[in-house]
Image: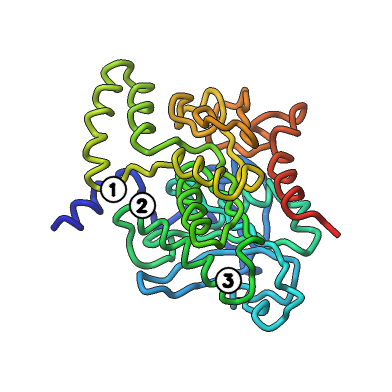
Amino acid sequence: MFKKTRKKIFSLIFPAPKFFYYNISSDGAVNVSEEYAYFCNVTEKFDNFNLVTPKGELQGKFISLNLKFGQSLLADAKTDKSLHNHKVIIMVGANAECAESTLLYGMDCYKSAVANDELSLLSFNHYGVGRSTGECCGPQDLYQGLEKIIQHLEKNGIQASNIILHGRSLGAAVATEVAWRMAYKNRPVNLIADRTFSSLSLEVISLFGLIIPIVGHVLGALLVPLFFLLNFSMPTKTRFSQLQKKVGVERNLAFNVYDDKIIPKTAGLAFNLANKTNTYVFTTNNKDAHNCGLIDLCGMSNKKLATLVCLDFYYKNFPQN
């Protein structure tokens, strides 16, 4: 009974849609509609993967120019030692987003790096989302799905130190928690927290207050005890700060945006971190500051603080030969 109630409440925060606004053509290319392709008007060909876990089957997409990588989800690295230094960026999507749109966003950020043939981009649908089976009854299920994918990559020869978790919005909170867990297992990964909140509890208070000033703050605050009771708090700021101390600031990047209609300044992670090293705050004229692509976020004149902030992070942590 408690599990069903918990699942219903969590579904209000994290809906699990089965259908998205995209079409797959006969040659396997994915064409995402304007609702999801607000960030880039491109069509890319992705490969599929399916990972069976005790909680369900995780379905996703990846793109790599290294033709050795196939349906086995980079399994060739298990036997081919030359692939052990291969880099993988796992894109962890925002709330109610699908693997295809998340991967398109990843291409918007890292297309030039993928072209060097040493990097693969990977995204997936959480349990119960899209073609992934199982169900999400709370944040723990989101964390466990991402952990399973990392474990599978490690099992097949990809080193944790060669993995970047790039999470956006709710996905960044998930990625931060998992990066923290990996660090305390002495298998640290790299993290980019893209437009996320300091905690889900603070996000609810701030968002309610933005929608309904004063009254909204009160209503949001009344929900906080329920969030703690259900273990929905998602303490992203605490985890990120602990990561900075554990593995160093250079392996963790966070950025937020002014005028974000989804994650207000009072809740944004980058605004609230005590250690501002490797954190950025952008100003944008884009009406959809929370969801737009990075080029649109800051405009071409300020591109350094847009797409290139992710590329800089990549090349600083993974110098090219």
Q: As drawn, is 171 to the left or to the right of 46?
A: left
Closer to us: 109 or 139: 139
Between label 2 and label 3, give the one nearer the viewer.
Answer: 3
Residue that lies at the very extreme toward the left in this rendered image: 1
The residue to which callout 1 is attached is 231
Residue 119 position in % (x across, y down):
72, 61
Residue 250, quarter of the rendered image: top right
Look at mark 2 in the image and give the residue it sits on. Answer: 139
Q: Residue at x 33, y 28 (%)?
A: 205
Q: Which residue position holds label 3? A: 154
Q: Amino acid at mark 2?
A: Pro
Local packing at callout 1 (Cα closer than 10 Å; few below 14, some 14-19, many 20+) is few
Q: Tell me if label 1 and label 2 are in contact, CB under 8 Å.
A: yes
Height in image: 97 above or below 124?
above
Q: Amino acid at mark 1?
A: Asn
- Kind of residue sitting beneath label 3: Glu
- Quadrant the C terminus occupies: bottom right
Residue sitting at the far top: 214
Q: Secondary structure at mark 3?
A: helix
Instruction: Decide which of tag 1 and tag 2 comes sooner along the chain.
Output: 2
Number of numbered markers? 3
Q: Quadrant of residue 141?
A: bottom left
Q: Secondary structure at mark 1?
A: loop
Q: CA distance from mark 3 to mark 1?
A: 29 Å
Numbered badge on residue 204: none
Seen in the picture, residue 126 relative to 38 is either above or below; the reply is below
